[in-house]
Image (cartoon, rainbow, N blue to C red):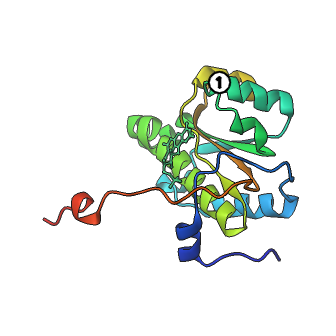
Amino acid sequence: MVKSKDFFQVVEERRSMRAFAPTPVEAEKLKRILEVVNRAPSAGNLQGYEIFVVRKAEQKQALVKAAYDQQFIAEAPLVLIFCANPARSAVRYRERGENLYSVQDATIACTYAMLAATALGLSSVWVGAFDEQAVRRAADIPADLTPVAMLPVGYASELPPATPRRSLDEIVHER
Ligand SMILES: Cc1cc2nc3c(=O)[nH]c(=O)nc-3n(C[C@H](O)[C@H](O)[C@H](O)COP(=O)(O)O)c2cc1C
């Protein structure tokens, strides 16, 4: 059983990582991350998303190009691509499922993966800036799926400082 960190420690320690060591991600750790993702909530429990695991150097280079030259994507030993599956959510929820729930499902799934990776001593970074069609081409993703987020995962090769946040007073509105 892989050891993991306490939830609040995970939240405190997580950073967007843009520098990865070449050390591979253990199969057991990837499995645990994906099992955590599979416990995420989803609209109507339909799980309106699909995940693609990319490891090949050539495909990662194509993802770098698709993401406007974000080179660190190719440094990570693996990249998870979270895609909305609009048709899956539309079966029960029509337009709302197609346009919103499937995207939310994929987003929550990626968030779970990000936190699970940190809990297991790995690092990651959410990549949202990319050309959808180029990502589909790079990872052979079917046209009916919408890439929502890419998550390069690996071992950190630097320790970035924590980033600032808005104050809760500014964000939270009592009514
Ligand atoms: C929807 C979304 C899209 C993002 N896209 C990118 C991206 O394309 N490239 C990148 O380097 N970071 C990206 N990030 C990471 C943010 O820049 C980062 O989370 C933010 O600056 C806070 O820093 P932290 O994650 O270290 O706390 C994205 C984050 C989110 C949630």
**Residue 127 horizontal side relative to residue 34, left or right:** left
Q: Which residue is painted at 81% across and 46% down in the image?
A: 77
Q: Which residue is painted at 65% across and 21% down in the image?
A: 134
Ligand 1 lies under 8 Å from the Cβ of mark 1: no
Nearer-the-camera pick, 112 or 3: 3
For the C terminus, give its image quadrant: bottom left
**Residue 120 horizontal side relative to residue 86, left or right:** right
Nearer-the-camera pick, 156 or 44: 156
Q: Does 142 sit above or below residue 157?
A: above
Could you say which quadrant of the image residue 33 lies in?
Answer: bottom right
Could you say which quadrant of the image residue 74 lies in?
Answer: top right
Q: Which residue is painted at 76% across and 77% down in the image?
A: 3
Q: Position of residue 146 (x, y in %)?
A: 57, 31
Q: Position of residue 30 (x, y in %)?
A: 78, 58
Q: Which residue is painted at 24% across and 62% down in the image?
A: 172
- Residue type, mark 1 in image: Ala
Q: Position of residue 49 (x, y in %)?
A: 60, 44
Q: Does 73 sit above or below residue 44?
A: above
- The residue that label 1 is drawn on is 66
Secondary structure, mark 1, is helix
- The residue sitting at the left extreme is 175
Nearer-the-camera pick, 15 or 114: 15
**Residue 54 horizontal side relative to residue 128, left or right:** right
Q: Residues within 10 Å of mark 1 (few under 14, many from 20)?
A: many
Q: Position of residue 45 (x, y in %)?
A: 54, 56
Residue 141 seen by the camera: no
